[in-house]
Image (cartoon, rainbow, N blue to C red):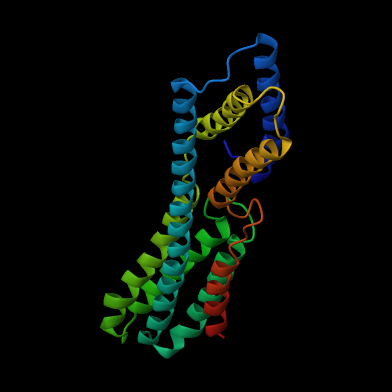
Amino acid sequence: MVFHPVTALFLLPVMLLLLELGRRFRTRHKSPSESTAVEGAIFGLFGLLLAFTFSGAATRYDTHRELVVEEANDIDVAYLRLDLLRPEDQPALRQLFRDYTDSRLRLYNVILHEVPPETKELQHEIWERAVAAASAPGANQDATKLLLPALNAMIDIAARRQNIFEMHPPAVIFLLLFAFSGGSAFLAGYSMNARGHSWFYMVALTLAVTATIYATLEIEYPRRGLIRLSDTDRTFINLRNSMN
C-alpha cells in the first residue's frame, strides 16, 4: 500500500475538527481541566512514532541517493574497462552502454516497481557481447579478469537499487500515525479551556503535525510529490555526457 504525500493534507481539516469536538465534548460533560497520565502517555507515543517514522524515511532516502551514485560509478568503471577489449569490439559495446545509461536515467522520471524490460534486455546483450569479445582469439586476458566483474557489479546494483527504493514500512505504521494524529488532536481539544480557547494555537498544532507527516511521506515516496531527486538525475546526466 502506497501513501501519496497529498494524503497528509487531509489531516489539516480533520485535526481541526477533532480539536473542536474534543473541546465541546469536555464542555458538554463539564469535565475537569486536568492533565492526566493517560494523555501524557498518548502524546509521548505519538511523538515517538512521528520521530521514528521521519528518521526511517530520511535514512532510506539517503541510502537511495548513495546507491544512485554507486550505480553510476559502477557503470562508469565498466565503461572505462572496455578499453581492454580489441578495438573492433569496442564501438558496439560503447553504444550499448550509452543506451543502457539512457534507460537508467529515464527510470528516475517515472514510478516503476521493477527493473524495466528494456534495461534487462540491454544488460543481457551487454553481457553476451562482452563475454564473446573477452574470449575471442587474440583478446586481452585482463579483459576477462577486470571487465566481467565490473559488468556483474553494474547489473547487480540495478536490482539492488530497485529493491531498496521499494522498501517501505508496513502500511499499518502510517495508518497508526494518522490514527494517533486524530486521537492526539481530540485529547488536545479536550484539555483546552472551554471558553478561552485560541484558534491560533489550534491551527498551529494542526499545521505542525500535518507539515511533519507530509514531509515524511515526501521523503518516503520520492517522485510522488514535490521531491524529484533532481540531484540524482544530474549524476546520470553527467555520466551520459562523459560517454559522448
Please identify the residue farthest to the front as the structure is shown.
Answer: 196
Q: Is residue 4 above or below residue 171?
A: below
Q: Please state the horizontal and vertical placement of residue 174, each as a whole percent of the image.
A: 54, 35
Residue nearer the viewer, 29 or 205: 29
Q: Is residue 232 visible?
A: yes
Residue appearing at x 47%, y 53% in the figure: 58
Looking at the rendered structure, the number of numbered marks drawn on it comes to 0
- Quadrant of the rendered structure where residue 6 is? top right
Q: Is residue 183 left or right of residue 199?
A: left
- Quadrant of the rendered structure where residue 23 is? top right
- Quadrant of the rendered structure where residue 197 is? top right
Q: Is residue 243 visible?
A: no
Q: Is residue 73 left or right of residue 210?
A: left
Q: Is residue 82 left or right of residue 149?
A: right
Residue appearing at x 67%, y 25% in the figure: 18
Residue appearing at x 30%, y 77% in the figure: 146
Q: Is residue 157 left or right of residue 203?
A: left
Residue nearer the viewer, 230 or 148: 230
Q: Please state the horizontal and vertical placement of residue 60, each as a whole percent of the image.
A: 45, 52
Q: Quadrant of the C terminus?
A: bottom right
Residue nearer the viewer, 126 or 238: 238
Q: Please state the horizontal and vertical placement of residue 89, each as a whole percent of the image.
A: 44, 83
Q: Is residue 186 above or below residue 7?
A: above
Q: Quadrant of the N terminus?
A: top right
Please identify the residue farthest to the bottom as the structure is shown.
Answer: 87
